[in-house]
Image (cartoon, rainbow, N blue to C red):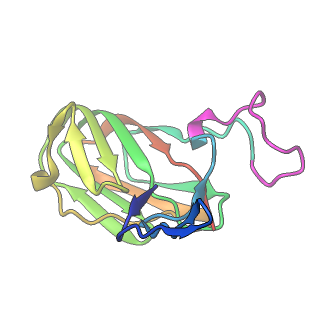
Amino acid sequence: MVRYSGDLQIERISGLGTFTLPFTAFDPFAYSTYWSHEINVDSLIVVDSDIYVDTYYNYTINRHQELTVYNYGNQNALPVIEISGSFSYLSLTVGGVEFIYRVPISGVLGVYFKRKTAKLAESNVLNNTNARYGKLPVGASRIIVGGIDLDFSMAIKFRQKYA
């Protein structure tokens, strides 16, 4: 995605025009065609690639856990973490940064690391968090899940990012 930035001056040369179109790119990276949860044996992935197929990051959480997630891109990834269930207090450590949700919930919580927000159903609940969002580094990384009264299922979704 780019944004036009500047003015457009057209130079006329024998009936034809040339111009320079200035753009500003805020995220000038290539992303994987597939989200991490969509990669399976039917995906169009090169056979000799380092990407594992059928690697779903879906977990049932009822206690403190350390999870391993693989980012096969060559840039940090910003995940979407979807939580369905209940807890009284939640702590998610991603890329060494601890995200905290302080209010008890029962329902579906979405934590969007790229947009730096959290939604309970369709309501913005960023004010119930510490608003700290980490990144998934390249390769294997740990995600630490902690909290009080944990009883939920969690899905971690992201697209690999390439320079």
The image shows residue 91 at horizontal and vertical percentages of 29, 57
Image quadrant of residue 36?
top right
For this view, does 115 lie left or right of residue 162?
left
Q: Image point 63% across, 68% down: which residue?
A: 163
For this view, does 163 lie left or right of residue 1?
right
The image shows residue 35 at horizontal and vertical percentages of 57, 41
Q: Image point 40% across, 67% down: which residue?
A: 8
**Quick check: is 17 in the magenta stretch?**
no
Q: Image point 31% across, 35% down: which residue?
A: 151
- Residue placed farthest to the front in the image? 14
Q: Image point 83% across, 52% down: which residue?
A: 49
| Residue 125 shows in the view | yes
The image shows residue 1 at horizontal and vertical percentages of 46, 55
Image quadrant of residue 127?
bottom left
Q: Tell me where the magenta segment starts and ends, as one range.
A: 37-51
**Quick check: is 46 in the magenta stretch?**
yes
